[in-house]
Image (cartoon, rainbow, N blue to C red):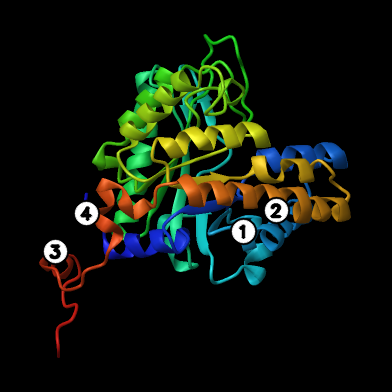
Amino acid sequence: MTISAGKIWGLRRMADANGRFKMTAVDQRPPIKNPIKEKRGTEEAPWEDVAGFKAMLVEELQGESSAMLLDPHYAYPKAISVYSPAKGLILTLEDSVFKEIDGGRLSNEIDDWSVEKIKRIGGDAVKVLAWDRPDSSPAARDHQKDFVARIGDACAKYDIPYVFELLVYPLASDTEQTTDYVEMKTKKPELVLESVRTFADPKFGVDVFKLESPLAASDVPGVDGENADDAQKWFDALGQEAGRPWVMLSAGAGMAEFRNILTHAFRAGASGYLAGRAIWLKAFQHFPDWDAIRADLQGEALDYMKSLNELTDAQATPWFEHPSAAGGKISPADASFRRAYPGFGEQR
């Protein structure tokens, strides 16, 4: 793979100085909006509550983050004025409202938002989540592939990294049924791997995979625990299928569970994490007690992030060491660079 100059720069902005991703997600919408509206007893979650919580996350957690993932409706407008310019900025593009059809689930972009707009407001990368089931209907699968490829083409056009997240979900035939943004406890690891295999095709333009555990979080042992070797085989296969830098998502896993997941992922070559609820969910449960939320973020949440970062520093693979990353270097003197950027370096 050849990575363009703009994408390399964006990847460098997302990672720490040593090429490891320590990224915090605050783009969640239903997982934040639904508890707030229940606590408030309102039909919709008040904008100030949702945005206020996200701004607090930015204020308290950006110090331990190499980058943060914001959404354009709540987090960006409320928190960008306090966001550190030293941190990478990732914007989400998928709409949290998806469409269910017979045989599958359909994803789409947020109305009136695009890769171009994310680039224009200063984004260092575009993140997209796509629901996928390899055994969904052909119509559903084709829609998802078109959706992912369309954004990949735009990221190539505007020279910005494409961070792509995959989540399996229940079909009508499954015993487990949910439309929440939670891990599917009865998921089959073979389906997780097949999804990654599909979208690792270069035609989709993915630069970094944000991946779920192939096993349910509660089934992942510590690396020294019982059945650890069996679990490691699934994570090794996940890294092989990704074929490019990849990070782990938490999908609502508990703190101890997510740490177990990371220990296996790092042994399989992951370059870090992009996680949210594993870090801040306990603090959020104090809502609407803002003082208690902030105290927990400054205490347990930050302590947990520091422990994850120590683990990441010790065991994660720098993104530029992945064979597909070509060392992560920008080479303006190369002929390939001059072909991609005509007129660069020419004296007039």
Q: Residue at x 18, y 67 (%)?
A: 337
The numbered mark, 4 or 1, whose residue comes first in the sequence reads 4
Classify 10 Å Cα crowding around label 1: few (below 14), some (14-19), many (20 and above).
some
Closer mark to the observer between disc 2 and disc 3: 2
Number of numbered markers: 4
Mark earlier in primary sequence (3, 4): 4
The CA span between labels 2 and 1 is 7 Å
Using the rendered image of the protein, determine whether residue 335 is visible from the camera's viewpoint: yes
Residue tagged 4: 2
Q: Are marks 3 and 4 in contact (CB under 8 Å)?
A: yes
Task: Give the amino acid at mark 2.
Answer: Leu
Q: Amino acid at mark 1?
A: Glu
Q: Quadrant of the C terminus?
A: bottom left
The quadrant holding residue 41 is top right
Say what amino acid the circle numbered 3 marks.
Answer: Ser
Q: Which residue is mark 3?
A: 336
Drawn side of residue 89 relative to residue 75, left or right: left
Reading the image, the residue beneath label 1 is 64
SS under mark 3: helix
Of 200 and 173, the residue lying toward us: 200
Looking at the rendered structure, the kind of residue marked 4 is: Thr
Q: Residue 225 or 276: which is nearer the viewer?
A: 225
Q: Earlier in the sequence, mark 2 or mark 1?
A: 1
x, y percent for residue 329: 27, 64
